[in-house]
Image: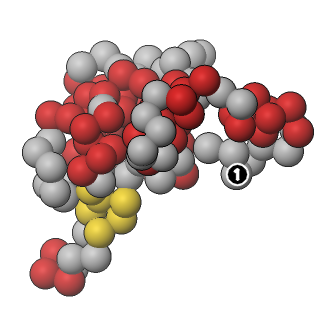
Amino acid sequence: MLRSESEFEVWRRILTSEIWDLDKDNDILPALMLSYNELPPHLKPCFSYCTIFPKDYPFRKEQVIHLWIANGLVVPQGEERIQDLGDQFFNQLRSRSLFDKVRNPSHGNTEEFLMHDLVNDLA
C-alpha cells in the first residue's frame, strides 16, 4: 500500500490509524482492513466481487476482467478501451498484493492467480 508513497505525512497517518487498535492480538487483520480502506473507490467493488471464487480457487486474469465488465464494474471514461481499463484495475489490485500469481505447470503458459484465504475473508 505504501510502496509508491513518498510523503511522510501519509506514512504517519497510516502508522497512527485507529484501525491498529481493532485487534491487539493480531496485526494481520487490521493491516488487511487498512489496505482495503485505502483502495480507490473504483477498485473496492472489483476486489469484493472476487469472493465469488471459492478459497484456493485459481482464476485467470482475463476471466475476472470479463466478469467485472459483464457486471458493470468497469466503466471507461472517454476514449479508453474497457478491456484496457479492466487490465489496469487488475494490475492495481495485484500490485497491492491482493492477488498472488500461482505456478501451475499443468496449464502451460496460462497465468493463474489466487486470493490468500485471509484476503478472501476480508473481501
| Viewer-side residue, 84 vs 21 | 21
Classify mark 1: residues with Cα within 10 Å, few (<14), some (14-19) or many (20+). few
Q: Residue at x 11, y 45 (%)?
A: 54
Q: Residue at x 29, y 69 (%)?
A: 102
| Viewer-side residue, 69 vs 90 | 90
Q: Position of residue 62 (x, y in %)?
A: 29, 48
User: Does residue 66 show up?
Assistant: no
| Viewer-side residue, 52 vs 77 | 52
Q: Residue at x 56, y 16 (%)?
A: 77
Q: Is residue 83 above or below residue 74?
A: below
Q: Position of residue 30 (x, y in %)?
A: 47, 36
Relative placement, left or right, of 14 versus 72 is right
Q: Is residue 107 above or below residue 47?
A: below
User: Does residue 31 show up?
Assistant: yes
Q: Residue at x 32, y 34 (%)?
A: 122
Q: The N terminus is located in which quarter?
A: top right
Relative placement, left or right, of 81 versus 100 is right
Q: What's the residue type where badge 1 is placed?
A: Arg
| Viewer-side residue, 53 vs 36 | 36
Disc 1: which residue: 3
Relative placement, left or right, of 77 versus 55 is right
Q: How is the image coloured?
A: secondary structure
Q: Position of residue 109 (x, y in %)?
A: 28, 76
State the SS at label 1: loop
Q: Is residue 72 above or below residue 14?
A: above
Q: The C terminus is located in which quarter?
A: top left
